[in-house]
Amino acid sequence: MAVIPAVVTNGAREWWIKLFGGLAGVPAGATIPNNPPTAWNPVIAYFKVGEGGWIDPGGGAEPRAPEPDLVWVTSATYPDPFPDIDAAVDITRDAAAVPTRYGATSRATFTKAVTFTDVSFIAPSTIEIECLLDFGDFNDDGNGNSPEMWEIGVYMDHPEFAVPVVPAGPPSVGTPGLMVAYGTFPKQVKDATKQILNLVRIVIAPSP
């Protein structure tokens, strides 16, 4: 079991402020195909792991510092800058014809729902989310290989869209949710012989 310190994303900070000010919700005109707007439920709904989130500075791959400003690169295919993990963002870099960070066969992602029983209150400024990959979860990267994970994000429904609880899994980017926290960690290789439990720790820093 690994405890992963996660950064709160810029997108989450923006929407939380709007929520506190009574400005958040689903705008009247917000729609996605075949899914009309509903009330926003601002609770953590799922996590996503991916094969991005690493860099090789010359001595071998290592985790990148977690980036709170990761968002889709906008293009005709992905017109909105949704916060997401780096492997998913890399797919949108490809679509926008800008330099990518990872190979096309090395950016698989996997999503899984969480419930309130997976979330623990640790302190007035801290919660932890249990993110369990069970024996049958994410054992193939879509190319017949065991996935090599370096990153994790936790998500809630996006306030501008009515979305399924768990978006489509690899290799697609998936239906947009709101990534509220993001963390990176030393490489974890997933296969059918093991479970992997990560505890994502979110700390809301006090004001200076």
Image (tube, helix red, strand yellow):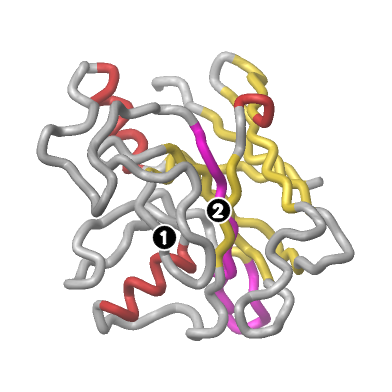
Image position, residue 178 (x, y; %)? 38, 43
Q: What residue type is disc 1 on?
A: Gly
Q: Around disc 2, counting alpha carbons within 10 Å, would you say few (fewer than 14), some (14 to 19), or many (20 or more)?
A: many
Camera-nearest residue between 37 and 206: 37
Which quadrant of the figure has residue 80? bottom left
Q: Is residue 59 magenta?
A: yes
Farthest left residue in view: 29
What secondary structure is marked by label 2? strand
Residue matched to label 1: 174
Image position, residue 37 (x, y; %)? 24, 36
Residues in magenta, as a range = 44-62
Camera-nearest residue between 140 and 89: 140
Q: Nearer the viewer, mark 1 or mark 2?
A: 1
Check the picture and name the quadrant holding the C terminus.
top left
Residue matched to label 2: 48
Image position, residue 128 (x, y; %)? 64, 31
Q: Is residue 55 above or below residue 3?
A: below
1 or 2: tag closer to the N-terminus: 2
Farthest front residue in view: 34
CB within 8 Å, label 1 to label 2? yes
Camera-nearest residue between 161 and 85: 161
Q: Around disc 1, counting alpha carbons within 10 Å, would you say few (fewer than 14), some (14 to 19), or many (20 or more)?
A: some
Q: CA distance from mark 1 to mark 2?
A: 10 Å
Disc number placed over residue 116 in the picture, else none: none
Q: Is residue 63 above or below residue 203?
A: below
Residue at image point 72% right, 59% down: 137
Q: What residue type is disc 2 on?
A: Lys
Farthest top residue in view: 124
Residue at image point 63% right, 63% down: 150
Q: Is residue 68 magenta?
A: no
